[in-house]
Every structure is written in structure tokens, then in C-alpha cells.
């Protein structure tokens, strides 16, 4: 009879649903992750709460206390919870770092599915415990979602927003640092691909250029200069190191203002041999940079200098003469990140011994101080297409070219006024000399006079402008 009663009780408790054991007085003791009278309900994962509140009078004695006697250990929390958040930094709970963000089921941003034990996150949140927010519009497919911790540690959102007088203005995190607040791994933001911007990376960047209407003193802080960097090809040192004739792949890396890093195609060179003279290398540098995609560099001047040895720039023979190649950046304008020289073995792609002998000379660098502003401040950016809509009188991809229309519109009015004034003076002089009314001709046909025709032409022109 007793066995039958026990079996009945176990069946009533649903045998703890297979997720617990039957304890004293036939009460289920649930395994970890399950709860309920029959252990049929599942718990969901916990994460730092996005928002929380003090728990209040936990022992119902009518007094709020932070003493250990009134602390309650709440299932899923990371430590015992007091009746109110402590204010002393010397306690085990640090309000400055974790107040109102203790662990909670689904991080207080979702509802737990008790059957599956999975969080059903609210709109805008994701993760196994809804511990992360989603990036807006999934970064429009033009960026990557990163946490605040990642962004701060790598300064991922540092962006160039323009330059003037040789100084670049940046937005975002300029210097990497360790972000340690509660939302370091919860809050996320879009880091846009080059040429895109906006909180959801839906906006395209427009070309930038130098405002053609500003003065040198205002925009450059003095004499306006294009950025210039110098590459040194120390063929003499290569010869001394017995590396003459060694063929390597030569390439340059350029960091663009929009965040993109471009690398020119690998080109085999061998200083001191036929096909690698100073003039050929100079042309190679120019052609390689101009071939970079997306119009990264569209206007440069590349020259060889005679600063190191003899007639190295004009010699076409494969002699071991050292030379410098100066690269002057006209477009894009403003300061430029330093070019990087890259070498690799023609066969294996490994690093080579050439590295010390071809390099950028920092001492010869000229910092460009011309402006680099959106649409050259002479147009409006169409962020949907990334194209500048130039004001009247300005043209070019970045509106940096002032055309005849800009002065023509102004001068046409001046020319008309001057012509009218000249006509009036001529008519007055004619009247004074001939004694006839202005505009009259000796034949008596006033309408045929040149002055009358000019006046009618100007009147028609003015009437057309009014319309």
C-alpha cells in the first residue's frame, strides 16, 4: 500500500520532469537550469542588466539597511543584493562600475521561453542573454559592428573630417584607451567602410578639395604648399653591399584620408642594372600611384633630384648612382600620411635585404597646408551618391575649379552697365557737337543709329533677366 502511495505522489510531481530528484516529503529538487514544482520550467541565461532598480525592503521590517543580515542572495545574481545600492567605494559593491547593472535574466531586455530556455530578445537587442544591442540597420552593409571596448582600444572610429593650415581635424577616438564601464561589451556601433559615413553607414563621402576662393593667409596660414614626400634610392649602398643585380618586387602603400589603405602593384626592379635607371624608376613611381583605384591619387608631380650623386637623374646607363624621387601631392590636397615602401622576393614573396636602401626620407617631407574640405566649400554633397553639387561658377569632382561662369556672371552686369554708360556719354557728346538730339542721324532715320540699337538690345536683355 505504501509503495502505491509513493508512486502516486511521484506521478503527481511528474517525476520532476526528468530534470530533478525527489527530495524529502516528495518535493522536487531541480537540477541546475530548471525550476518549478515539477522542474519543467527552464531558466534563461543571465547578463548585465541594461537597467535595474534598488530592491527595497527585502525583509519587510520597515527599514532600509545595507547590513549583511538584510542581504539576499537572488538566483542568477553575481553577489548578494542589499536593500539599496551602497555608496561607499570601499565596499564589495562598486556603484561607479556596476550600480543598476547587476546580472539579470535576459539582461532585462528580453523574455525567457520557459520551454527552450532561450531568451526572446526585444527589438534592437541580440545575444544569448540579450546582452548586446544591434547596430542600426546592420550598418547598411557598408560597415562592421564593434563593441565600445573594441572601438576604444583600437581607435576604430577615428575619422578625418578635413584639414586646413597643415593640421588635420579628426572625430572619434584619437588615442586608444581602455574602456572599462559596464557597457564595454554591450553597446555597439558601426565602423564604416572607406567612402561611407553616418551612424548606420548609409551616407557616401564626397570628394574634398582646396577652396579656390580663400586667400593664402586665411586658408594656409602663409605660403600655400602642396604636400611632398621624398623616396631615396641608395644604389651606391646596394652596390657596396654586393646586392647589385638582385631583383625584388617594389611597391608603395598609401593611406587615404577616407581610411582606405592602398598598395600599388608589385613591380620587379633591380637597381644598378638595365631597366632600373633613375628616370625609369621615377616614371614607375608616378605611374604606380596614379593607377591606384577609386581615384585615390589623381594629380601628382614626380621628379628626380640630383642631390646625391652626379647625373643620376639623367643617366640612362645602369650605373650605381643614388638618387631621390620627390612626390608632390596636388590631389588630394592637404597633409598626407607617409608613403610606405614594401619589398618582397620575386620568387618566394618573402622580405628581402633591400629594405634599408630604399626608404622615405622624413627630413625632406613638406607638410601640405592647403585646405581639404568637403566639396571645397563651393558645393553641397549629395550623400546618397557621393557626388558634389557645385555652386554656379565652380566645377570638378570636388568643386575646386573656378570656371569662367563665376566671373562672367558678375562681369556681364558690369559690362552692360559700362556699355550703357559709354552709350550715354557718346550720345551726349554727339548732341553737343552737332546740335541735334541724341540718337538722331544726319539722314533723319533715328532708329537706324547705332546708339538706338544698342539701347534696345540692353533693354531686351534686362527684360529677359526680370522674367
Image: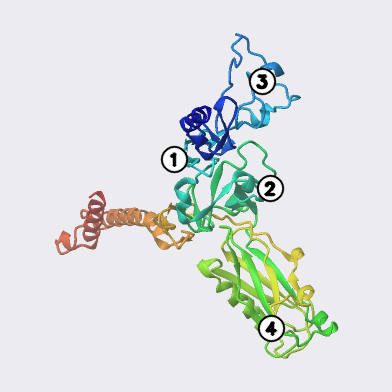
Q: CA distance from mark 1 to mark 3?
A: 34 Å
- At a point 65% along the width and 47% down the height, the residue shown is 174
Q: Is residue 190 above or below residue 113?
A: below
Instruction: Work out whether mark 4 precedes mark 1 in sequence or the reverse, and give the earlier one.
Output: 1
Q: Is residue 150 left or right of residue 112?
A: right
Instruction: Work out whether mark 1 precedes mark 2 in sequence or the reverse, and give the earlier one.
Output: 1
Residue identifier under label 1: 123
Q: Quadrant of residue 349?
A: bottom right
Q: Position of residue 55 (x, y in %)?
A: 58, 20
Q: Residues within 10 Å of mark 4 (few under 14, many from 20)?
A: few
Q: Position of residue 272 (x, y in %)?
A: 75, 87
Task: Pick whichever, 321 or 123, lies toward us.
Answer: 123
Are the residues tagged 4 and 1 within 8 Å (C-beta)? no
Instruction: Work out whether mark 4 precedes mark 3 in sequence or the reverse, and give the earlier one.
Output: 3
Instruction: Work out whether mark 1 precedes mark 3 in sequence or the reverse, and give the earlier one.
Output: 3
Residue identifier under label 3: 71
Residue identifier under label 2: 176
- What's the mark number on residue 347? 4
State the residue lying farthest toward the left.
444
Q: Give the colour scheme shown.
A: rainbow
Q: Nearer the viewer, mark 2 or mark 4?
A: 4
Instruction: Work out whether mark 2 precedes mark 4 in sequence or the reverse, and give the earlier one.
Output: 2
Q: Is residue 330 above or below residue 131?
A: below
Q: CA distance from mark 1 to mark 2?
A: 31 Å
Q: CA distance from mark 2 to mark 4?
A: 39 Å
Q: Position of residue 307 (x, y in %)?
A: 77, 75
Q: CA distance from mark 4 to mark 1?
A: 54 Å
Amino acid at each position: 500500500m505504501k509503495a502505491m502511495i509513493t508512486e502516486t505522489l511521484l506521478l503527481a510531481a511528474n517525476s520532476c520532469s526528468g530534470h530533478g530528484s525527489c527530495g524529502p516529503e516528495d518535493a522536487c529538487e531541480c537540477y541546475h537550469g530548471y525550476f518549478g514544482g515539477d522542474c519543467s520550467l527552464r531558466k534563461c541565461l543571465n547578463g548585465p542588466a541594461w537597467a535595474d532598480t534598488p530592491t527595497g525592503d527585502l525583509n519587510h521590517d520597515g527599514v532600509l539597511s545595507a547590513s549583511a543580515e538584510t542581504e539576499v542572495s537572488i538566483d542568477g545574481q553575481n553577489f548578494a543584493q542589499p536593500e539599496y545600492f551602497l555608496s561607499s567605494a570601499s565596499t564589495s559593491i562598486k556603484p561607479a562600475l556596476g550600480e543598476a547593472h547587476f546580472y539579470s535574466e535576459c539582461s532585462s531586455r528580453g523574455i525567457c521561453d520557459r520551454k527552450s530556455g532561450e531568451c526572446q530578445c526585444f527589438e534592437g537587442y541580440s545575444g544569448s542573454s540579450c546582452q548586446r544591442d544591434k547596430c542600426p540597420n546592420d550598418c547598411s552593409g557598408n560597415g562592421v559592428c564593434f563593441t565600445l571596448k573594441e572601438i576604444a582600444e583600437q581607435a576604430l572610429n577615428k575619422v578625418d573630417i578635413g584639414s586646413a593650415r597643415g593640421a588635420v581635424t579628426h572625430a572619434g577616438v584619437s588615442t586608444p584607451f581602455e574602456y572599462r564601464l559596464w557597457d564595454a561589451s554591450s553597446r555597439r556601433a558601426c565602423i564604416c567602410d572607406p567612402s561611407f559615413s553616418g551612424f548606420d553607414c548609409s551616407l557616401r563621402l564626397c570628394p574634398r578639395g582646396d577652396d579656390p576662393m580663400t586667400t593664402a593667409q586665411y586658408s594656409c596660414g602663409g605660403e600655400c604648399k602642396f604636400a611632398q614626400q621624398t623616396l631615396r634610392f641608395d644604389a651606391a649602398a646596394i652596390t657596396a653591399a654586393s646586392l647589385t643585380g638582385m631583383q625584388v618586387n617594389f611597391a608603395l602603400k598609401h593611406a587615404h584620408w577616407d581610411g582606405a589603405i592602398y598598395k600599388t602593384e608589385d613591380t620587379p626592379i633591380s637597381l644598378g642594372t638595365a631597366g632600373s635607371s633613375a628616370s625609369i624608376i621615377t616614371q614607375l613611381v608616378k605611374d604606380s600611384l596614379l593607377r591606384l583605384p577609386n581615384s585615390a591619387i589623381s594629380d601628382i608631380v614626380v621628379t628626380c633630384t640630383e642631390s646625391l650623386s652626379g647625373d643620376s637623374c639623367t643617366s640612362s646607363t645602369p650605373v650605381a648612382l643614388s638618387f631621390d624621387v620627390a612626390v608632390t601631392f596636388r590631389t588630394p590636397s592637404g597633409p598626407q600620411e607617409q608613403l610606405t615602401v614594401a619589398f618582397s622576393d620575386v620568387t618566394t614573396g618573402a622580405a628581402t635585404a633591400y629594405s634599408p636602401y630604399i626608404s622615405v626620407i622624413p627630413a625632406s617631407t613638406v607638410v601640405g597646408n592647403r585646405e581639404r574640405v568637403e566639396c571645397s566649400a563651393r558645393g553641397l554633397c549629395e550623400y546618397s551618391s557621393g557626388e558634389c553639387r557645385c555652386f554656379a561658377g565652380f566645377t570638378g569632382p570636388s568643386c575646386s575649379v573656378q570656371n569662367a561662369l563665376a566671373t562672367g556672371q558678375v562681369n556681364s552686369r558690369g559690362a552692360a552697365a559700362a556699355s550703357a554708360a559709354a552709350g550715354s556719354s557718346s550720345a551726349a557728346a554727339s548732341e553737343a557737337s552737332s546740335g541735334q538730339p541724341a540718337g538722331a542721324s544726319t539722314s533723319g532715320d533715328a532708329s537706324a543709329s547705332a546708339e538706338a540699337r544698342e539701347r534696345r538690345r540692353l533693354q531686351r536683355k534686362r527684360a529677359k533677366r526680370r522674367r
